[in-house]
Image (cartoon, helix red, strand yellow):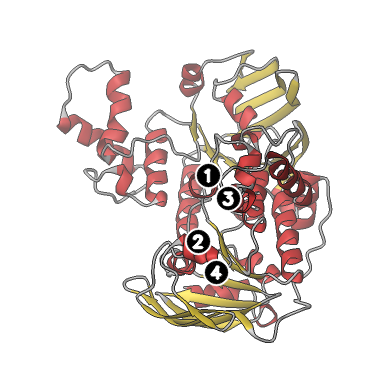
Amino acid sequence: MLKQSVLKVVDIKKSFAGVQALKGVSMEIEAGEIHCLAGENGSGKSTLIKIVSGVYTPDAGQIQFGGRVYQRITPIESIRNGVQVIYQDLSIFPNLTVMENLAFNQELANKRRLVNRRRMKQIAEEAIERIHFDVDLNARVGSLSVANKQLVAICRALMFDAKLIIMDEPTTALTRKEVNALFQIILDLKAQGIATLFVSHKLNEVFEISERFTILRNGEKVITGNTSELDNKKFTFYMTGREFEEQPFIPRKVSEEPVLSVEGLGMNGFFEDVSFSLHKGEILGITGLLGSGRTELALSLFGIQQADTGTITIEGKPVELRSPEEAMKHGIGYVPDDRLTEGLFLPLSIGDNTIAAELDNLANRLGVVDENEKRNEIDRWVEELAIATPNPDNACSTLSGGNQQRVVLAKWLARDLKVLVLNGPTVGVDIGSKYDIHQILRRLAEQGLGLIIISDDIPEILNNCSRVLIMRNGRINAVLSPDQADEQTLSRYMM
């Protein structure tokens, strides 16, 4: 039986200030289909989504909903045709309750002037029942986990008779358990005939959930097909136009004495009795589920949160890390998991972000920065880390995610570091940039830096670390070398 197309775009073109973002892209999604839209940052994915949802008007081409042809549409027309977009920021109101988030749109759409709490409760209860979501309707959305916020957004989307739900990078901040729960909901939606356009660059998730795929590169459609006909190597090549040779990291020059030693470290309520050592030239991996204590351990190593018990030693000398300033003084750098709010000053220039951690070194005794030395330092790191920008004076917000992460790295490498702690070093970064960042980290290790990668991306840990600490319930549950472990083994220790 031939399925009806819920969405079809034909030869869509779109330019911004002379730059062609989409160059004749076509794609079709059938009712109940789970379709993956993939591509590196800047490939045109977001532009295509905004055209389908009516935010942007295409320069040329057609948009078809259930056979109805549009040259251009408004957001309201897109919603009436059954399209709902759940963006990465979820677009929900954190200060309102679950019930209010779910019911207000319908109340406004019906032009009601008076609030009826009983009616709103009934609307919200019907919405959460659609996906069997068990949640306190009176809870403020800001207090919910990311996974539950996402479920609120899905419930709200289904209230508008959705035929196609577009999910933009929906698993970025989810644990594996939460990803499994989300995928089950997507399968339930499929059973109801609701299609899902799953926007992602995580290979394992694409293969796990999607039936068909479309890959964009530089504004053009590279290929559309069945996911069953795809493998990792082909997927990566279609997305990037490059072929990568994934080789496990083998440290070549490891110092005899550790650069960092941690003994019996503990932080009340988060982790306890953590001991390990890190040598120059090696990359140590720390993994575990969210809530395992891994992030708090990272924060304690950079002085953001202070451990209650235990000792930290740098090159044989005990140190107290009571603040980031003290950690920096002892040669420790920290790359946070959220570069947008914790790692960068987005409105400032790329150059200013690059030298932010070494301003003291560039200033004279009067606190005046030597502009020539500053410019030389900026140019050095832009070139060394291949930060793709026409001008380092541009705002950091103009960069792709991968290039923003390179700026965060440059900020720390400009200092004389002994240890670099990276919490989720490639979160939200596309495949090509991810590979490039891993190569940079390996090169830094070969130059004698001690690195710690904290991540729940198991392939990242296995491919790039010489030893792996697995945390569970605030303790180190196992210490493995990558040649002793595979993804299943690590997952078993994590769970």
Residue under the point 60% across and 72% down:
285
Q: Residue furthest front?
A: 366
Residue picked out by circle 4: 330
Q: Amino acid at mark 2?
A: Arg
Question: From this viewpoint, is residue 5 visible?
Answer: no
Q: Amino acid at mark 3?
A: Arg
Residue picked out by circle 2: 176
Where residue 305 appears, x then y in whole percent?
Answer: 39, 64
Q: Earlier in the sequence, mark 4 or mark 2?
A: 2
Looking at the image, residue 3 lies above or below residue 129? above
Residue picked out by circle 1: 340
The mark lying in front, picked from 4 and 3, is 3
Q: Nearer the viewer, residue 466 or 326?
A: 326
The mark lying in front, picked from 4 and 1, is 4
Q: Is residue 148 left or right of residue 39?
A: left
Residue picked out by circle 3: 365
Q: Is residue 308 left or right of residue 350?
A: left
Q: Earlier in the sequence, mark 4 or mark 3?
A: 4
Looking at the image, residue 275 lies above or below residue 371? below
